[in-house]
Image (cartoon, rainbow, N blue to C red):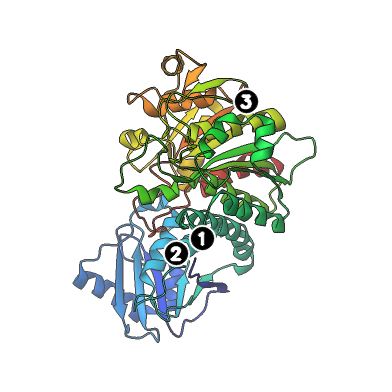
């Protein structure tokens, strides 16, 4: 749940109460607009307080002045933006999170006129987005709240700006993204006894309220389609599997869609190849790829994107039941290709294999991207700072890299070649689902590549970024909602920039 601020945008004017937030560079001088609003005494106060505190105005540094002389506000909060290069590299979503972390009252005003920098509506909208993402918390199942949380309420944050009307319009587009990230976080944070495959599918079904067409495939429908790989994973659980197909048709009728596929293993014990007990509770997050796709579809539909987008998620629970598949089993995928099961804990690629084939076969997408918390090996390579990117198309890989830099949800391209494809060859089937320890992320991607045909495709291994990732200014929880902002930017750049 998000303990959101009520956000307002108002023209520059005198601030009478609450917290007042202003910005300075390394010279410690606010902009001319801010200096005029504060008055000369307050500007001198900033300089004197900075000297006493050793505040240098470096990027992301913060100085608070309680009951500032000459002002009627409770606190004056001064945030450093650094030098010119720092300002050019500022992540404004992260800056919004920093602001939210420093505000502790019911009312705060941010004067958004920056020293030696032009303030755009998109810049302010991104700051407001970061503020709201920072306020997220998941306490649905807590019957007792921490003392500091009691009565916290949402509070009110006012952005003092030059042109409120244009900024309100820009922020409208960010609200859908904010809600999409929160939906993804909520899904990943939910306990596995509450969120099984059927319940997850119902959450996807709720997107119909926004005009998304949603179709749910149950076990019977998947069996008819021949999705033997996905069903092989699901057969160990008393809770049947599901595939949810979400369609947003906001583009031209004859335009091919772009497609996003998410791994949705709502809980992963490892199956017969059972995982160690320590940390297994985190495996409720093994559906973060599917959560991202649902959040993305919400974001796209909320802003009525001029795009045709398909989202498809494979939902299963991987359990060690007496009916569970075994190492040595061979399953037949929807494509007709067979897979030997070496390790039942390499289950995500089995789910994705059938869903990827289904999507490329039915929708003939312009390009297709899948997301999955697929391998621990990607965390060995990239820690939790980047998602691993594998692709059969250089242009698509580059566009994802650009979108990652723009949003701060960064990707790093990893190798995908014939050597890795050879490593998954099986003695008894067309391929095997695990090639062992070496190159584990690349061999997993090589298996997925066998199910995309010639469609431009990218695979994002988000095992390190989607859950339990390092906290930052916009995420203080366990689930990050990683990927919603990245892929929404990709959709925007592909369709809406072309149509504008």
- How far is mark 2 from mark 3, CA to CA? 38 Å
Residue at screen point 42% across, 62% down: 97
| Of pointers 1 and 3, the one earlier in the residue sequence | 1
Label 2–label 3 contact, CB within 8 A: no
Question: In the image, residue 224 lies at what x, y percent?
Answer: 69, 32
Question: In the image, residue 435 lies at what x, y percent?
Answer: 39, 22
**Left/right of residue 215 with respect to residue 352 in the rendered view:** right
Residue 332 placement: quadrant: top right
Q: Which mark is residue 129?
A: 1
Q: Which residue does the numbered mark 3 point to in the structure image?
A: 455
**Circle 2 residues within 10 Å: few <14, some 14–19, many ≥20:** some
Label 2–label 1 contact, CB within 8 A: no
Residue 56 placement: quadrant: bottom left
**Circle 3 residues within 10 Å: few <14, some 14–19, many ≥20:** some
Residue 253 placement: quadrant: top right
Question: In the image, residue 476 lies at what x, y percent?
Answer: 38, 60
Q: Which residue does the numbered mark 2 point to in the structure image?
A: 138
């Amino acid at each position: 749940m998000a303990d959101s601020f009520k956000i307002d945008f108002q023209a520059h004017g005198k601030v009478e109460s609450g917290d007042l937030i202003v910005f300075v560079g390394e010279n410690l001088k606010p902009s001319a607009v801010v200096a005029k609003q504060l008055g000369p005494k307050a500007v001198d106060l900033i300089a004197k307080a900075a000297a006493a505190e050793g505040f240098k105005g470096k990027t992301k540094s913060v100085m608070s002045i309680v009951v500032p002389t000459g002002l009627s506000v409770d606190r004056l909060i001064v945030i450093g933006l650094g030098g010119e290069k720092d300002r050019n590299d500022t992540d404004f979503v992260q800056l919004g999170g920093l602001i939210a972390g420093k505000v502790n009252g019911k009312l705060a005003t941010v004067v958004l006129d920056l020293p030696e920098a032009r303030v755009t509506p998109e810049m302010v909208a991104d700051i407001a987005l970061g503020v709201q993402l920072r306020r997220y918390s998941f306490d649905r199942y807590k019957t007792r709240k921490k003392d500091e949380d009691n009565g916290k309420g949402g509070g009110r944050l006012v952005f003092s700006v030059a042109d409120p009307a244009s900024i309100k319009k820009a922020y409208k587009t960010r609200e859908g993204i904010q809600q999409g990230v929160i939906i993804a976080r909520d899904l990943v944070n939910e306990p596995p006894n509450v969120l099984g495959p059927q319940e997850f599918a119902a959450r996807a079904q709720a997107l119909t309220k926004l005009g998304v067409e949603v179709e749910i495939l149950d076990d019977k429908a998947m069996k008819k389609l021949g999705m033997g790989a996905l069903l092989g994973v699901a057969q160990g659980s008393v809770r049947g599997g599901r595939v949810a197909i979400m369609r947003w048709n906001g583009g031209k009728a004859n335009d091919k869609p772009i497609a996003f596929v998410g791994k949705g293993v709502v809980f992963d014990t490892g199956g017969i190849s059972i995982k160690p007990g320590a940390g297994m509770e985190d495996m409720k997050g093994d559906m973060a790829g599917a959560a991202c796709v649902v959040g993305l579809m919400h974001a796209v539909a909320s802003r009525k994107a001029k795009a045709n987008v398909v989202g498809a998620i494979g939902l299963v629970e991987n359990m060690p039941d007496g009916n569970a598949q075994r190492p040595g089993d061979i399953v037949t995928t929807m494509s007709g290709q067979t897979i030997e099961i070496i390790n039942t804990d390499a289950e995500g690629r089995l789910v994705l294999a059938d869903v990827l084939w289904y999507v490329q076969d039915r929708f003939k997408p312009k390009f297709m991207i899948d997301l999955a918390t697929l391998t621990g090996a990607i965390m060995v390579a990239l820690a939790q700072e980047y998602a691993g990117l594998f692709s059969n198309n250089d242009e698509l890989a580059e566009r994802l890299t650009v979108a990652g830099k723009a949003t701060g949800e960064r990707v790093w391209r990893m190798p995908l070649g014939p050597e890795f494809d050879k490593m998954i060859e099986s003695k008894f089937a067309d391929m095997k689902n695990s090639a062992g320890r070496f190159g584990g992320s690349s061999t997993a991607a090589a298996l997925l590549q066998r199910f995309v045909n010639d469609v431009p495709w990218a695979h994002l291994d988000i095992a390190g970024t989607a859950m339990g990732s390092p906290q930052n200014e916009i995420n203080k929880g366990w689930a990050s909602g990683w990927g919603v902002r990245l892929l929404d930017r990709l959709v925007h750049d592909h369709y809406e920039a072309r149509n504008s």
